[in-house]
Amino acid sequence: MVDKHEEGFGPDIVSVVDENGVEHTFEELDRIETDAGRFIALLPIYNEAEEILDGDGELIILSVVEDEDGETYLEPIEDEELFNEIGEIFEERLADYFEFDEE
């Protein structure tokens, strides 16, 4: 489940609860909608200095899914070709702000 917090003009912070009930916090960098669906690009937010050093700073790209009850969920993109296509779109859109490794 996704819980989005908006506080003034700061970054958009998204809290995601995983299947184990653990909450993770991310900064929402961008979102797009294509014929294939809605997608979001997130960057992990770490609370501890050690987590920052251990983190890989990897951009996380997920599909935005809404169920019948109106609840919004984020799911991994299972289709590798679609994942690569959406990843390239986000990289182009965010290239002025971030440096991406070619992996």
Image (tube, grey):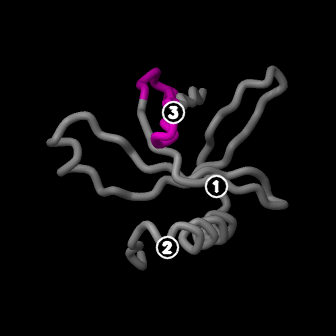
Look at the image and give the residue range highlighted in magenta. 7-23
Q: Residue at x 81, y 20 (%)?
A: 69
Is 39 colored magenta in this rendering? no
Looking at the image, is 101 positioned above or below residue 78? below
**Residue for badge 2:** 95
Q: Is 6 or 1 nearer to us in this picture?
A: 6
**SS of the residue at dot 2?**
loop
CB atoms at circles 3 and 2 under 8 Å apart?
A: no
Q: Position of residue 78 (x, y in %)?
A: 64, 55
Mark nearer the viewer, 2 or 1: 2
If the image is split into quadrants, where does the C terminus sit? bottom left
**SS of the residue at dot 1?**
loop
**Residue for badge 3:** 8
Q: Residue at x 73, y 50 (%)?
A: 38
CB atoms at circles 2 and 1 under 8 Å apart?
A: no
| Residue 88 located left or right of residue 56 | right
**Residue for badge 1:** 78
CB atoms at circles 1 and 3 under 8 Å apart?
A: no
The furthest residue to the left: 50
If the image is split into quadrants, where does the N terminus sit? top right
Residue 35 is marked as none
Q: Amino acid at mark 1?
A: Glu
Q: Amino acid at mark 2?
A: Ala
Report crowding for label 3: few under 14, some 14 to 19, many 20 or more residues within 10 A (C-alpha): few
Report crowding for label 1: few under 14, some 14 to 19, many 20 or more residues within 10 A (C-alpha): few
